[in-house]
């Protein structure tokens, strides 16, 4: 894991960057507030060579597209900048907003921002209360930034594949870790929104596609993250285990990777995490399949759409499209 912080107007423009690999900065809130320190706070992170991200705090009674537009126009976005929705509603602007509307706001904001700025990672921040008790679909865009209190760094206590973990507010600053072996790995992930091919065999991909299509064809409802956990089980990649649960993974400083065996497993684990991006695509496929009434032309269009890419998500989607075509031909 690597370490970082997140800052807002409550923190200094000259915060210490010692020992950090990334920084998130609050930019906007609602439709009228702009953090007066955000430019200096961003520039300090980038001057130190850190990965930088920005977040928006919503007023969820407002139109999500209007708020997203207000947020996006403040920044001259650069490759590798991360984008986050701070999804929580305990303040006076949000606590009276129905939870269903809060969910709808989140979904619309993430979708719209990704459509406007598709070459950037767009994710969501929330605490475990919102993740467990308000969320209904495990929707978090490209990544989840989870906040906890009293949990060790890197152990937020959730089953979902988190990317960032806010674990402490010591000394009036929020402290975070990221699920990457080093800054270079985080920077590469942040800059590359079209994943490179990963070391999975065609048989592995077929197994995943079989499990996905079986779920859809059975009319089992929305594919949940628990289904993906099963798909990524021993029958596909048994060694894909998060290394941060192993005390031998890091050296005495708690940051430097010191075990080559676990390093290899971490690489494999991150490859599997890429596959979790399949969830959103599968949910779209589910709507399209329904009672398997797609026309041949629709299936062909879907297959052609995914055939142009060789990353893992599209390879799996292509396999699913083939199985849909086979079912239609029966």
Image (cartoon, rainbow, N blue to C red):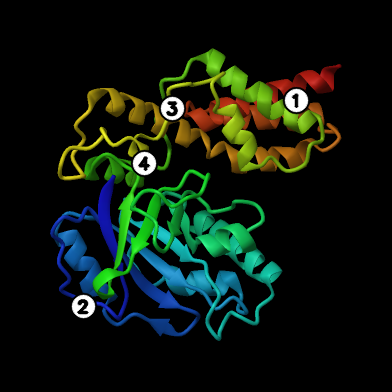
| Image point (67%, 70%), residue name | 99
In the displayed structure image, the side of residue 1 where residue 318 appears, left or right = right
- Label 1 sits on residue: 324
Real-space Cα separation, disc 1 to disc 3, in angstroms = 29 Å
Q: Is residue 329 above or below residue 129?
A: above
The image quadrant where one finds the N terminus is: top left
- Please give the label number shown on residue 75: none
Q: Where is residue 234 in the image (x, y as percent from the top left)?
A: 54, 21
In the displayed structure image, the side of residue 23 where residue 99 appears, left or right = right
Real-space Cα separation, disc 2 to disc 1, in angstroms = 55 Å
Q: Residues within 10 Å of mark 1 (few under 14, many from 20)?
A: many
Real-space Cα separation, disc 4 to disc 2, in angstroms = 31 Å
- Please give the label number shown on residue 240: 3
Q: How crowded is mark 4: few (under 14 residues within 10 Å), some or many (20 or more)?
A: some
In the displayed structure image, the side of residue 231 where residue 188 appears, left or right = left
| Image point (36%, 41%), residue name | 192
Q: Is mark 3 on a helix, strand or loop?
A: loop
Q: Is mark 1 on a helix, strand or loop?
A: helix
- Please give the label number shown on residue 12: 2
Q: Position of residue 144 (x, y in %)?
A: 47, 52
Q: Nearer the viewer, mark 4 or mark 2?
A: 2
Q: Are marks 1 and 4 in contact (CB under 8 Å)?
A: no
Count of numbered tags: 4
Q: Nearer the viewer, mark 3 or mark 4?
A: 3
- Please give the label number shown on residue 192: 4
Query: Dividing the picture into quarters, in which one does residue 47 lie?
Result: bottom left
Query: Dividing the picture into quarters, in which one does residue 15 lie?
Result: bottom left
The image quadrant where one finds the C terminus is: top right
């Amino acid at each position: 894991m690597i370490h970082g912080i997140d800052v807002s107007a409550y923190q200094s423009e000259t915060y210490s960057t010692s020992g950090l690999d990334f920084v998130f900065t609050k930019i906007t809130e609602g439709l009228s507030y702009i953090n007066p320190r955000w430019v200096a706070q961003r520039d300090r992170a980038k001057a130190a060579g850190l990965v930088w991200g920005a977040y928006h705090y919503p007023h969820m009674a407002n139109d999500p597209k209007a708020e997203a537009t207000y947020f996006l126009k403040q920044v001259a976005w650069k490759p590798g900048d991360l984008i986050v929705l701070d999804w929580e509603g305990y303040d006076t602007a949000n606590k009276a907003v129905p939870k269903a509307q809060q969910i709808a706001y989140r979904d619309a904001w993430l979708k719209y921002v990704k459509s406007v700025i598709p070459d950037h990672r767009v994710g969501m921040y929330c605490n475990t209360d919102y993740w467990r008790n308000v969320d209904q679909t495990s929707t978090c865009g490209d990544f989840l930034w989870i906040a906890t209190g009293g949990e060790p760094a890197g152990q937020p206590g959730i089953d979902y594949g988190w990317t960032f973990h806010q674990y402490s507010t010591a000394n009036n600053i929020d402290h975070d870790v990221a699920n990457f072996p080093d800054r270079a790995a985080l920077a590469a992930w942040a800059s590359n929104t079209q994943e490179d091919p990963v070391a999975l065999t065609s048989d592995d991909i077929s197994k995943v596609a079989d499990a996905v299509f079986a779920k859809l064809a059975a009319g089992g409802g929305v594919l949940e993250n628990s289904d993906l956990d099963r798909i990524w089980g021993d029958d596909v990649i048994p060694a894909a285990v998060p290394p941060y649960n192993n005390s031998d993974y890091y050296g005495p400083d708690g940051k430097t990777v010191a075990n080559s065996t676990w390093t290899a497993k971490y690489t494999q684990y991150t490859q599997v995490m890429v596959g979790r991006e399949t969830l959103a695509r599968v949910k779209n496929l589910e709507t399209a399949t329904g009672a398997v009434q797609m026309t041949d032309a629709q299936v062909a269009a879907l297959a052609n759409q995914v055939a142009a890419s060789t990353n893992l998500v599209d390879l799996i989607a292509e396999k699913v499209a083939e199985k849909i075509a086979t079912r239609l031909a029966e």
